[in-house]
Structures are given as C-alpha cells and as structure tokens.
Amino acid sequence: MIALFGVGAFVYLFYNFLVYALCLIALPYLLFQIIFSSKNREMFLQKLGFVPREVWAGCQGDPRIWIHAVSMGEVSAIHPLIRELQVRYPKGAILLSTTTASGIKIARERVREANAVFFFPFDIPIVLSRVLRRARPGLFILAETELWPNVLRLAKRAGARTLLVNGRISQRSFPRYRKTRFFWTAVFDNLDCLSMIRVPDGERVIMAGANPVHVFVNGNCKFDQAALSVNAAHEEEMRRLLDLGQADRVFVAGSTHEGEEEAVIQAYREMLRKHPGLILVLVPRHIDRVPRVEKLLTQMGLPDYILRSRLESGGRMGRKVVLWDTFGELFKVYSIAALVFCGASLVPKRGQNILEPAAWGKPVLYGPSMEDFMDAKELLEGCSAGITVRSAADLAETGSRLLDYPQEMVNRGNLAREAVVSNRGATRRNAELAIRLLEGP
C-alpha cells in the first residue's frame, strides 16, 4: 500500500483514518455542547467550520494573511508581528484564529489590527475546506510548534504559502519527533519556511524531517512583545488598585498550577518571619481554580485574603494577601513586584513566560520544569537575573535572601530588563520572512 500511494500519502491516509474515528467517538459530546451549553456553543460551532458571515465581512483586502496562535500567551507573543504586517499591508486582511476561549478574549480585546478573529477549526478535511473557501489566505502562519497536518496540506493546495514562527522542539519532546520522523517529514514538506527560536531547535527540526533549506533561526517574538508592552501607566494603575505605598514590597506568584500554590503559601509564610510587611499577590493560571486556592489559603493559616474582583481603588483594607480572580492582568501585576515566582515550573508543566517580569526589571524565580522557555531561562541565568528553585523551602530561602539585599534585587532586575531589550528583533526578522513568501525574494 505504501508503494502504491507513496509515504506522504500513506501518512495522511492513516492520520485521517484516526481523525475521523475520533470524530465519531466525540460526536455525541460535540452535539451536547452545541445544543445545551450556551457557554461553549459558539466555540464548537466555529471549530466545526460554522464561522458566522459577519466574521468574514471585514476581510475584503489583499493580501489575505491567516495567523493561528493557540492560546492567550501565543496571541500576545504574535501581536507585534501582526502590527508589522498590518503596517506593511494596510489594505490587506489579517485573519487571526486561536484555540481557546482565553485566546479569543485577548484577541478580540487587544489585537485591533486583525480584520477577523475566530476559533481555529478541527483538523478535519471537510471542516477545513469550508473555512479555507471563506478565508482564502495567500499566507498561512502558525505560531509556536502548533502543527496540524491537514490544515497545512489543504492550505498549500489552496495556493497559500505556509510559515511557522517561534518554532521550538524541546530536548524532552525531541525523541518522540525522531521516532516518528516518517510522519513529520510529510508534515514539514507542507511548510515553506520554519522559523525556529534557537539553533538547537533548528537542528532538532531538521533531524525530525524538515528540509534544511527551509529552516531559519530568527529568535523569539516574546522578547519584542514583553519589551514593547512595558508602560509606566500599568504600574500606576496597579499601585492605586492595591493602595500600595512606596515602601510596600510585593511577592507576585504568577500562573500557578495545582500543587504550586501550597509551595508558594508555605514559602510566603516562612518569608513573613523575616519580612513581616511582605504582601502576597497570588495569580492562578486558570481562574476556575480560584475556589480551590481560597480553601488552601484558609487551611494553611491565611484566611484574611481579598479577591482582586472585590478591590476598589484605594481599598486594600490592610490585607496582606490578594488572590487574583480576574482575567488578563498578570503582565500589569508584575510591574509592582519586588519578588516574582513564575509557575507551571515546580510541577511538570513546562514553564510560563518569564520574559514578562524580566521586561519590568524584576529578578525571576521558577522551578526546574522550563522546557518551553529554555532560551529565556538560559539568557536570564546567564546574567544572574533568573534563579531556579526546587521546593517550597528553596523558594523561601532564596526569596528571603533577595529581600535581605534590595539593591542586589535592583541590580539583577536591571540586568533582566537589559537582556530582554537587547534580544529584540525576532518580530522584524519573521515579518521579513513573511513578506518574502508573499512577494518573492
């Protein structure tokens, strides 16, 4: 059969067999969500290709550029690239898709340059054909290593050029790519260019089956996004909201996951022994976990907390713990920190964006699981602005030591800021690559 169809065709035949089998299994769940869940109805209808006509109404320009960013972090990271392309093609149409509800919310609120925002369709040929007929992209851009075989193949068949930006393959996931190289070679063949973050990422994607001629190393757009987003007005807003004085010191624990809040609370209680005025701002990665974190705070001896949603300007009411239960403000919260811990790292979740607090000039603590941000980790550790901690005790000890020497924290923070600013440029390089694909060399 492989000889009859060819390796690439066989790969897609097998992949689509699995896709349609999963569709049949998931169909009752999808129908239930569409019929009975008003919260999820829009998302699942669009994922099945039923994007409302009004979404396409503002997409009459040329060239048409479809950009996909999986979630909130990727949408933010790719925003500077969208700005660059909109400036280059003011009469064009930029279509932005994302997979999650948080990504859609951020895209609609902040990415004003996009002419259309919609949920990314399932990687099913019949669904994608419907969306591609409406989208008609001349260029299709994937952000991060969000590889969907059918959309790449069908976009190419429809005449679009295809580009991966901010690509990465971690050392941990590389063995899986290499073992299934026969599959990924067929997928990578449908990408005109692969713009990877670091040299090791470029080497790994080539060993996983990509054509070396199509691989570039252009850096990380998140450096540009972080550096460009710093605004003194954000810090003023947060200081007013929390009623902070100049002498107040804040420990911000951002993007925490299950299993990390306990460590943060334990470390905070330990740090309070030496630094009794320290304020904790705890920002879980997922808002729906806030009730669970509230119980933890009470059980671990910190019942006198306040939810961010209950804060009024000038009304912190003397509380030392603020639990953040609103969406999309973490970058602003980092501005008021003396000490930062970035979550998804003490548990095996591959890390979160440590460039955001670094851009504010903050030294950053994080756990050992940082596979998705190795370039940022190596950069910050290279200038003594990033520190790995491995437990609650380690977090407490390191945090207390930094708080004991405020000038050292300032110096480390300045180095963090300089490192982020000096590594900008990935957005421009990726924009130039996109323009070359659209216009030719």
Image (cartoon, grey):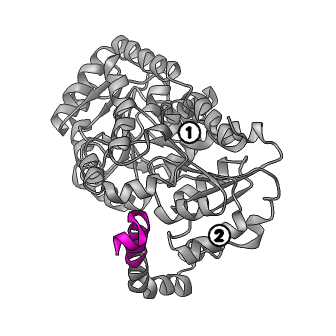
Which three-letter amino acid code belongs to the residue tagged 2?
Answer: Val
Asked whether the residues under the numbered discs 2 and 1 touch, taking CB atoms below 8 Å apart as contact, a structural biologist would say: no
Residue depicted at x 64% and y 40%: 434
Q: Residues within 10 Å of mark 2 (few under 14, many from 20)?
A: some
Viewer-closest of 157 and 328: 157
Residue 236 visible in the shown view: no
User: In the figure, 408 relative to 346: above or below?
Assistant: above
Compute the Cα span from label 2 to label 1: 43 Å
Q: x%, y% of residue 196?
A: 45, 38
What numbered label is drawn on residue 241?
A: 1
Q: Is residue 165 magenta?
A: no
Earlier along the polypeptide chain: callout 2 or callout 1?
Answer: 2
Give the quadrant of the N terminus: bottom left
Residue depicted at x 65% and y 55%: 160
Q: Is residue 14 magenta?
A: yes
Q: x%, y% of residue 423?
A: 49, 22
What numbered label is drawn on residue 131?
A: 2
Q: Please identify, in this view, whether the residue under mark 2 or under mark 1 is nearer the observer.
A: 2
Which three-letter amino acid code belongs to the residue tagged 1?
Answer: Leu
Q: How many marks?
A: 2
Viewer-closest of 416 and 187: 187
Q: Is residue 354 left or right of residue 41?
A: left
User: In the figure, 299 relative to 154: above or below?
Assistant: above
User: In the figure, 190 relative to 51: above or below?
Assistant: above
Find residue 280 and report its image quarter.
Answer: top left
> Element under label 1?
helix
Q: x%, y% of residue 55?
A: 73, 65
Chief secondary structure of the magenta portion: helix
The part of the chain drawn in magenta is 1-18
What numbered label is drawn on residue 183?
A: none
Residue depicted at x 60% and y 35%: 237
> Element under label 2?
helix
